[in-house]
Amino acid sequence: MAEKILRVNMTTLTGAFEDVPSEWAGIGGRALTSAIVAKEVPPTCDALGKHNKLVFAPGLLAGTPAAQSGRLSAGAKSPLTGGIKESNAGGTAAQNLAKLAIKALIIEGAPVDDSKFYGIQIAKDSVKIVEATELVGKRNYEVIKTLSAQIAPKVGVLTIGPVGEMRMAAANISVKDPDGNIRSHGRGGLGAVMGSKKVKYVTIDDTNGTGTPIADPEKFKGAARAFAKAILEHPVSGEGLPTYGTNVLVNVLNEAGGLPTKNFRTGQFEGHDKISGETMREIIVKRGGKPKHGCHAGCIIQCSQHYVDEKGEYITSGFEYETIWGFGANCCIDDLDTIARADRIMDDIGIDSIEGAVIIGVAMEAGIVEFGDGPGTLKLLEEIGNGSPLGRILGNGAASVGKAYGITRVPVVKGQGIPAYDPRTVKGIGVTYATSTQGADHTAGYAVATNILKVGGFIDPLKNEGQVELSRNLQIATAAIDSTGLCLFVAFPALDIPETLAAIIDMLNAKYNLTLTGDDVIALGKSVLKTEHAFNNAAGFTKQDDRLPEFFSEDPCAPHNLTWTMSDEEIDEFWNF
Amino acid sequence: MQITVKLFATFREGRFSVEGREYPEGTRIAVILSELNIPEQQIGMIMVNARHAEPDQELHDGDTLAIFPLVGGG
Ligand code: SF4
């Protein structure tokens, strides 16, 4: 099977398979979604208008036996930031698309009659666009269940909940995982873009799909084995993540004084131990849940889990540090069960759980509910799902809430909520928040690894020296990894064990019969960042948008009592490459 | 002198989470690590009063010492 681009036009309600243009042949994942958006979407267009396009692309290694290779990139112009967006997620869809040899799915246009929603049903060499009448208004768990029953138990599903249908700027896109649960293209409001195209869901039935062949299977096998070995050997990916999930970070960041607490007032949370990864593991084991779980077949790290209630009933999975920080320390709710319910509601209604947490923090700042009010928080999330007037102000993002209530303590960059690491205390991640093309996004250049976790060396988190260079190097490497379709957590072994990167390059070369070197990978990362930066500039961004909110420079953060002191000139050095 | 020792993740197994412990003035972190049977190669981070520290650092009365294995997330 030769690889194809599947283009679906929602104005004409038709879809067609196209040959892959040579300029896109060697790229996948984020490199491809960003290249397509940069080429085909006018940067100044309305993100919710017909000129925007929603692009899905599996990574270059998707569909192969390589560990961790099933992440899917989604891209568009973001209604939240107004800039380019790539958000990647686990779930089965990347592997389903790769099996059908679909290198990218482009959804463009918008129906003239906007009273209906549609489903895009993809199977081998075929695509159907059907009315989605009975699923309109339904939440994500139900949509996934219904479609899996209607089409096939293993069908891949991408769906939006009511928040996406209502085109709120914090809406996400849900991806079905191997158990029929939910992973998310969380950040940047891509669910609203899907809603604006009137697409309720996409199904991918990969029956009889064979994928594209591996050019040199023997070489691939050896490289894949070396890669898996490095992952399992590294203490973070081999032991830490599967045991405690990402939530092990609550205690780490609290101890370092970088756990943003009470809407970024201080860096330590009194109730940290109650919401920590250690406590979470105890609860899950005691109640008979699953402490480790992979978001797609072929994940050997398994940072996910099934969090269950006291009766052992499933509440949520993919219960991440950022969500737990966000409702825990940030909103002062020291109860994991309440936070798990919040996570469940957000997955179900279809809103980004990081933005959701920052939204509620700002809502508490505004006095809509008190800090620490768990039941009040769950009610507000339901209001978002139900689309009440207050719900819509909330669902449009933390910046929207700040504006509506005249608040200045609004932790966002380029309109996107700042996640779980205080930039005053973890200065490298502050540079990433400021400069990322994606708006505030910790995954774009995870300086926490080197500032706090001592992975890939150590650069003092409390000082400005070396942070711009650190963030730049990480953002370049991340852009490259996001293009392979590998889960970003392979960066932990990659930063410490040199064989990891060599194995990734060997796998790419063996799959596509290439002769890539480490330098080519770095060049790819750089070109992805530059493409995205150029799009943002053409959309109207300037370097003044690469700044943190004023309060970080004014209000010291305890216990270190530091402010953000990086000068504009220092930050602007970032783009010097 | 009084030191608050905090252990995290797998280091808690068979040990403790947090304890106030007595040590002679000027005790180095390394001494406490070997007392607790924590091999240095398993250590990810050591923090004293919320700052990263190395095993050869001397402690002072009232310090909080936090010891983590190599962990990560994101
Ligand atoms: S390590 Fe976690 S995020 Fe990465 S592929 Fe596995 S479950 Fe998904």
Image (cartoon, rainbow, N blue to C red):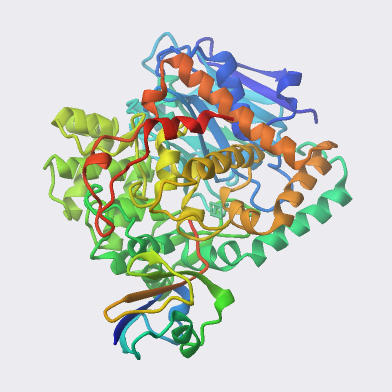
Quadrant in which the N terminus of chain A appears: top right
Q: Specify whether A210 is left or right of A424.
A: right
From this view, report whether residue A280 is shown above or below residue A544: below
Residue A186 visible in the snapshot: no
Q: Quadrant of residue B28?
A: bottom left
- Please state which of residues A479 and A129 is positioned toward the viewer in this rendering: A479
- Please state which of residues A80 and A577 is positioned toward the viewer in this rendering: A577
From this view, report whether residue A376 is shown above or below residue A197: below
Quadrant in which the C terminus of chain A appears: top right
Q: Quadrant of residue A19?
A: top right
User: What is the x, y in percent for residue A307?
Assistant: 40, 62
Q: Specify whether A148 is left or right of A493.
A: left
Residue at the spot x=34%, y=40% of the render? A355
**Total number of numbered discs in the rendering:** 0
- Please state which of residues A474 and A282 is positioned toward the viewer in this rendering: A474
User: What is the x, y in percent for residue A497?
Assistant: 68, 59
Q: Specify whether A301 is left or right of A421.
A: right
Residue at the spot x=31%, y=50% of the render? A326
User: What is the x, y in percent for residue A80?
Assistant: 36, 27
From this view, report whether residue A148 is shown above or below residue A54: below
From this view, report whether residue A411 is shown above or below residue A124: below
Residue at the spot x=34%, y=65% of the render? B50
User: What is the x, y in percent for residue A259?
Assistant: 32, 56
Residue A490 visible in the snapshot: yes
